[in-house]
Amino acid sequence: MLQAMGVGGATATIAGCAEAPTDDTAETEAQSLAEQVQNSTPNEVDVDTVAADPTDVPDPIDRDQPKTHDITLETTEVTAEIEPGVTFDYMTFDGQVPGPMLRVRQGDTVNLTLENPEGNAMPHNVDFHAIYGTGGAAEATHVNPGESASVSVRMEYPGAFIYHCAVPNLDMHISSGMYGMILVEPEDGLPEVDHEFYFGQNEIYTDKSTGTEGHHAFSMDAMADENPTYVTLNGEKYAYAAARKGPLEVEKGDSVRVYLVTGGPNVTSNFHPIGNVWTEAWPNGAIESQPDKNVQTMKVAPGSCFVGTMETPVPERIKLVDHALSRVARKGLLAEIDVLGEEEPDIFDPNPNE
């Protein structure tokens, strides 16, 4: 189908999120393909979940010499439930939203291969904000179904950075799940903590109202109006809240580091831990900067990341939310962490008169 429509390897990409496509014909053909996929007969659900496990975080770096990594990402188009009874056609890296968290060290070399399986309908690529190079490697990794492409890059600067698909209609691809985080640790590493959790926020634009049962097709019009049907952590409504796959659990006194990548494509996160505070917060994932201290809410723009730590002196349920609270109450954004242990009434006493 791609070849018949003339969408080939020379299709223009958006380089570094800034350089507009120069091939108007390719752009029009890519738009036509996106609309055909959007309006096609819905697929049957073929995976139980796309929500990335927040505990699936690579181990901290514990070495003082550079290393070479061979990393393969597969672009996977799947149908899954946003919430029970509501299905959607996702585009993903490795079948999850956000894509896998990658963890390397400043000075490491990454040999990256992007694979686009034959069964997919769309061309894909990947733009890494963590690397020097045209389009963050988007042009070099542009692959049609049945193709793969490889690049080799050295990680020159530390921080937490987004990676995302950057073909024409990149906003549709990102909204459908094609984004993730790469953490480039500084040479001296990061301070040790007891737990690390990984989340991604993005909005999903569909042709039906939130909660309407059945299959939801992607809505280009809703996206153009920036009127999302869902705003989620890890791609599904309340994915890691207690009512679904959560809550996550830690012990009282544990230190917790949270990573957030905001895929967007349009909405800025206002990331807040209800019942807690970001003891240390690194805006924009700039982990070599001095952290902000005791921050209640952090803005995390689309195309950026956040790294923050929390202390857990009392047992409680921490609710991770976007403090644009209609997104929590109406659109599906919530994750929960239970802090387990004995009460600490000197710090918090829920029953002072008993």
Image (cartoon, rainbow, N blue to C red):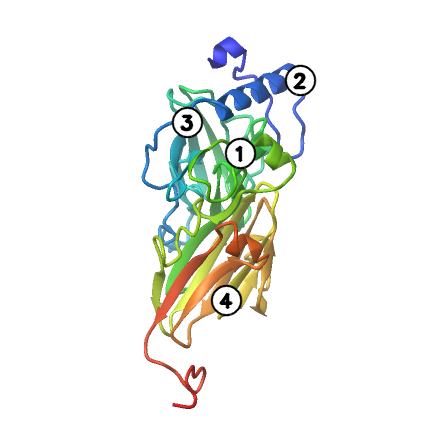
- Tag 3 or tag 1, which sits nearer the N-term? 3
- Please tell me whether mark 3 sits on a helix, a strand or a loop: loop
Residue type at numbered disc 1: Asp
Residue type at numbered disc 4: Ile
- Tell me if label 2 and label 1 are in contact, CB under 8 Å: no
Q: Tell me where residue 319 appears, x and y as whole percent.
A: 46, 63
Residue identifier under label 1: 207
Note whether 3 is above or below 305 in the view shown.
above
- Tag 2 or tag 3, which sits nearer the N-term? 2
Numbered disc in front, either 2 or 1: 1
Label 1, label 3: how many angstroms apart (C-alpha)? 13 Å
- Tag 1 or tag 2, which sits nearer the N-term? 2
Label 2, label 4: how many angstroms apart (C-alpha)? 47 Å
Disc number for residue 274: 4
- Please tell me whether mark 2 sits on a helix, a strand or a loop: helix
- Tell me if label 2 and label 4 are in contact, CB under 8 Å: no
- Tag 4 or tag 1, which sits nearer the N-term? 1
Residue type at numbered disc 3: Pro
- Please tell me whether mark 1 sits on a helix, a strand or a loop: loop
Note whether 186 is above or below 208 in the view shown.
below
Q: Quadrant of the C terminus?
A: bottom left
Image point (34%, 33%), residue name: 45
**Structural crowding at the residue carrying mark 4, measured as other residues with C-alpha within 10 Å and reported as few (<14), some (14–19) or many (≥20):** some
Label 3, label 2: how many angstroms apart (C-alpha)? 29 Å
Is residue 88 toward the left or the right of residue 229 in the image? left
Q: Nearer the viewer, residue 217 or 311?
A: 217
Residue 190 seen from this side: no
**Structural crowding at the residue carrying mark 1, measured as other residues with C-alpha within 10 Å and reported as few (<14), some (14–19) or many (≥20):** some
Residue identifier under label 2: 24
Disc number for residue 42: 3
